[in-house]
Image: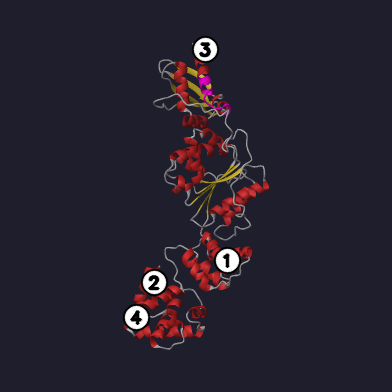
């Protein structure tokens, strides 16, 4: 009787073989060993070489196997797995398989007459790593906020898959340099090991590819492709938080790459513990290597980044402008680069020097913050509106009382709300010198002590500042 059941199992394998590629059959189905068939319970017991194989079969081939079993055994058959959990000591564990509902004959997926796609991994192809060649370690300026992740990244690039930093999980707020760092690791690894299959992919692109693969019935090709990568770099994985199917698929890719010693690098805007909607089995894998935080760069690092970019782009920016940009760019490397690019474009197009006035205008338009720093232009605009005075008159040589008052108040508030030196404030408000600014500030402070109406005016103007920011 056992022989007849074995023959029925062979018929089941024949049906499966007709509906998958030869590589898939040899990888996932040939290792299965038929154990027994319980006629009372209509249950087939098979042995699989690892829990991973069991999870993979249940995830992707449960319907195909159920259909083949029902057709070969001519009854509704349940599947039971015997997992080899300790090969050296011969330990196994029996697990009931899931039973899919409404089993239908699967559509053949053989691709014998079709041209291979980029996701076909049977024969590894030349692979475009999708890396940005400009984002290297050389251009990734080191500072206190990124020293550890940068050092670890260099180690990984030189020994991919051979360090304890696998997976390498980098997290931090937007604009802190995560994408630059993980790109730099890939670029350096590809330089040192040109034959390695290195791939950078955003979480969103991965999800689009997976969705297309499901729609086109090429999910196995998709998985096989990603399981052929030597160094897989995935950016912004927090975008998978509410995508359980994408996460389940990535779990199998991750598990396979990790088991065979391939390097995995992940970036997110939050640590693994805060990734809502991600199952524990994946979170524990994310956390088993090294978790490194990239903090927003401090002012000194921002200045170093700006100076390095100026040297690279051949742009000359005065020290006071460098200081101002570093203080107002909200600790974002992305904002710093955007401001420098804008300064360069304006100076070239208008053939004008880069100065504080231009920097203020660009910061105001380019840097998004919840509490945007006030500029001298903002202050002049609000003060002039409050007193009903035209800015042109404030800039003039006129000594009319109302113009002098607006001029002095603007200088006082500019010194209070901006980090500019008195000489720069004077230049921006009618071309006055620093002594005029100091005298104006002193005059306003003295008047505030004795004039309640004037104090109310200043308070009203400062309230408008809050609304402005």
Label 2: few (<14), some (14–19) or many (≥20) C-alpha neighbours in 10 Å: some
From mark 1 to mark 3, how far is it between C-alphas?
81 Å
- Look at the image and say whether residue 309 sits in the magenta stretch: no
Q: Position of residue 221 (x, y in %)?
A: 54, 34
Label 3: few (<14), some (14–19) or many (≥20) C-alpha neighbours in 10 Å: few
Front residue of 374 and 173: 374
Magenta: main secondary structure? helix
**Between marks 1 and 3 in the image, the one whose residue lies nearer the viewer:** 1
Task: Kindly identify which residue carries mark 2.
Answer: 465
Is disc 3 placed on a helix, strand or loop?
helix
Task: Kindly identify which residue carries mark 3.
Answer: 3
**Between marks 4 and 3 in the image, the one whose residue lies nearer the viewer:** 4
What label does residue 344 carry, if any? 1
How is this picture coloured?
Answer: secondary structure
Look at the image and tell me whether residue 256 can be seen. yes
Look at the image and tell me whether residue 284 can be seen. no
**Between marks 3 and 2 in the image, the one whose residue lies nearer the viewer:** 2
Q: Earlier in the sequence, mark 1 or mark 3?
A: 3
Is disc 2 placed on a helix, strand or loop?
helix
Task: Kindly identify which residue carries mark 4.
Answer: 455
- Could you say which quadrant of the image residue 404 lies in? bottom left
Q: Are marks 4 and 2 in contact (CB under 8 Å)?
A: no
- Look at the image and say whether residue 20 sits in the magenta stretch: yes
The correct choice, above or below, for 456 with respect to 231 in the image is below
The correct choice, above or below, for 137 with respect to 459 in the image is above
The correct choice, above or below, for 6 with respect to 432 in the image is above
Label 4: few (<14), some (14–19) or many (≥20) C-alpha neighbours in 10 Å: some
């Amino acid at each position: 009787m056992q022989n007849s059941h074995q023959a029925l199992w062979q018929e089941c394998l024949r049906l499966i073989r007709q509906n998958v590629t030869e590589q898939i059959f040899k990888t996932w189905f040939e290792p299965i060993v038929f154990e027994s068939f319980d006629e009372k319970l209509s249950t087939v017991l098979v042995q699989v070489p690892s829990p991973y194989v069991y999870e993979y079969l249940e995830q992707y081939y449960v319907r195909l196997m159920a259909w083949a079993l029902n057709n070969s055994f001519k009854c509704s058959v349940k599947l039971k797995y015997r997992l080899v959990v300790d090969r050296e000591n011969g330990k196994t564990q029996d697990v009931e398989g899931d039973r899919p509902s409404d089993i239908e004959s699967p559509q053949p997926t053989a691709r014998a007459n079709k041209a291979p796609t980029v996701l076909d991994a049977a024969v590894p192809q030349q692979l475009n790593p999708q890396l940005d060649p400009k984002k290297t370690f050389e251009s990734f300026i080191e500072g206190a906020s990124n020293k550890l992740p940068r050092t670890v990244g260099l180690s990984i690039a030189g020994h991919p898959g051979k360090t304890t930093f696998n997976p390498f999980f980098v997290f931090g707020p937007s604009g802190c340099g995560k994408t630059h760092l993980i790109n730099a690791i890939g670029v350096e690894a590809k330089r040192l090991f040109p034959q390695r299959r290195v791939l950078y992919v955003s979480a969103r692109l991965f999800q689009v590819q997976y969705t297309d693969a499901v729609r086109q019935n090429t999910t196995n090709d998709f998985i096989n492709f990603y399981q052929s990568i030597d160094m897989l770099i995935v950016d912004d994985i927090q975008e998978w938080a509410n995508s359980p199917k994408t996460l389940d698929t990535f779990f199998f890719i991750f598990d396979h790459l990790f088991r065979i010693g391939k390097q995995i690098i992940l970036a997110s805007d939050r640590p693994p513990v805060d990734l809502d909607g991600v199952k524990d089995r994946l979170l524990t894998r994310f956390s088993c290597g090294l978790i490194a935080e990239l903090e927003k760069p401090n002012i000194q690092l921002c200045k170093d980044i700006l100076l390095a970019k100026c040297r690279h782009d051949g742009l000359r920016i005065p020290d006071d402008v460098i200081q101002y940009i570093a203080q107002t760019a909200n600790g974002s490397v992305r904002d710093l680069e955007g401001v420098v690019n804008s300064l360069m474009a304006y100076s070239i197009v208008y053939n004008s020097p880069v100065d504080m006035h231009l920097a203020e205008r660009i910061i105001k338009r380019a840097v998004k913050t919840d509490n945007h720093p006030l500029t001298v232009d903002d202050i002049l605009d609000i003060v002039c509106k409050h007193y009903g005075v035209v800015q042109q008159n404030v800039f003039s040589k006129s000594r009319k009382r109302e113009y002098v008052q607006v001029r002095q108040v603007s200088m006082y508030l500019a010194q209070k709300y901006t980090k500019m030196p008195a000489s720069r404030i004077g230049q921006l408000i009618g071309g006055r010198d620093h002594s005029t600014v100091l005298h104006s500030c002193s005059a306003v402070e003295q008047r505030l002590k004795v004039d309640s109406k004037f104090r109310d005016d200043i308070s009203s103007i400062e309230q408008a500042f809050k609304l402005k920011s």
